[in-house]
Amino acid sequence: MKASDDAPARPAGSAPQEGRPRSPAMGDTFIRHIALLGFEKRFVPSQHYVYMFLVKWHDLSEKVVYRRFTEIYEFHKMLKEMFPIEAGDINPENRIIPHLPAPRWFDGQRAAESRQGTLTEYYNTLMGLPVKISRCPQLLDFFRVRPDDLKLPTDSQVKKPETYLVPKDGKSSVTDITGPIILQTYRAIADFEKTSSSQMALATGDVVDVVEKSESGWWFCQTKTKRGWVPASYLEPLDSPDEAEDPEPNYEGEPYVTIKAYTAEMEDEMSLQEGEAIEVIHKLLDGWWVVRKDDITGYFPSMYLQKSGQDAAQAHRQIKSRGAPPRRSSIRNAHSIHQRSRKRLSQDTYRRNSVRFLQQRRRQARPGPRSPGSPRGAASDPAREATARGAPAAQRRPYPAPMQREHQAEAGVFRLRPGRLP
């Protein structure tokens, strides 16, 4: 079997009429979106590879299913038989069903990795086809959850599956994945009752593996017996109360627009109406970001924000499906295994540092005396001039030194510089 585009199993136009699906009626079950999460290398009963898909259904429920590439290819051939015109069997110019390379005789890890981009493009195209194809019963049946999708590795297995996730930027290349992804393990600090079928209930002390960390603050997790979405605020790392992947504040800010109104329930939160323009200065993994409106800062749910100029339809669907996750400070009866609490900057610190940054930016934007050799009409840049004069590093920071010291002091970080005594 060659690794070229498939050949039709029947002559053009000979598909049986009874196999031709009807056009779906309004209100029928359908799939909204199919996302490729990655693939797994399994060793039972023998070594093979399966692709992980996150399937979002008409009712906004989300299910993870696992399919071998040979299954996907057989489904593709069946689809071509059912729709010979759209497959280009009668006239190649009429083809709208995307191409899919055939399996190889010896499929290894490199082949599994390289197919990820092809499969992503294939299903994105397929879901954009007319509803008689994208909502046909055969496609729905192929992506329904099977009993095998719910089976997880047992402790008796000698070798556990290796999971390889698609990079966050969506690019899939063999150079992007160098080894199995070791899923991070977290512990539940309190009981969590699920409110939808796509979520997963937790009991205090439950240990979960995190498959995906969404910016919304909802994480897709799994245990030995179940999978589902969980609020990140209910989870803590096993080795430290702090989330090592939380980024540093960015006081320059990123422009966002609110797509849903929110009324503050705590003093450190911000109330905003739908359609307001704000700046995000700190993206925290629990889904509650620090935003700035003029000189005021506060926490705001990231699910209610959309980057300026982007389509908000998908974000609205997520809001309807799960809503904003709860904040850690609102969880009752939380029990951590760590003696010290999680480090957090106060809103007073955010405000002070934000004001200092904005003041410095305004000063730099004002026209000033030209430095020798600078172009006519160009304002002098104090930071650049300091660098040219060989000024100490403290004078060349992107924002004022007191702001840096305040960050370090509040976070409990104190560093000794070479050549200086405490």
Image (cartoon, grey):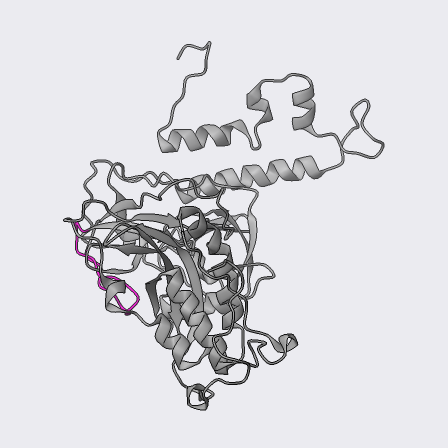
At which x and y percent is residue 249?
48, 41
Tell me: residue 35, above or below residue 60: above
Task: Left or right? Give the position of 415 relative to 152.
Answer: right
The kind of secondary structure the magenta stretch mainly shows is loop
Q: Quadrant of the C terminus?
A: top left
Q: Which residues are magenta?
A: 191-206
At which x and y percent is residue 132?
49, 83
Quick check: is 203 in the magenta stretch?
yes
User: Which residue is the extreme one toward the left?
Assistant: 156
Quick check: is 125 in the magenta stretch?
no
| Count of numbered marks | 0
Task: Left or right? Give the position of 171 relative to 226.
Answer: right
Task: Left or right? Give the position of 314 relative to 323.
Answer: right
Tell me: residue 353, above or below residue 292: above
Near-viewer residue (17 or 372): 17
Residue 318 appears in the rendering: no
Near-viewer residue (254 or 100): 100
Identify which residue is drawn at 41% across, 71% down.
Answer: 75
Near-viewer residue (140 or 248): 140
Identify which residue is drawn at 78% across, 28% down.
Answer: 369
At which x and y percent is residue 314?
48, 67
Identify which residue is drawn at 83% across, 35% down.
Answer: 377
Task: Left or right? Give the position of 102 relative to 254.
Answer: left
Residue 322 appears in the rendering: yes
Identify which residue is drawn at 81% across, 22% down.
Answer: 372
Tell me: residue 22, above or below residue 35: below
At which x and y percent is residue 43?
26, 50
Near-viewer residue (49 or 105): 105
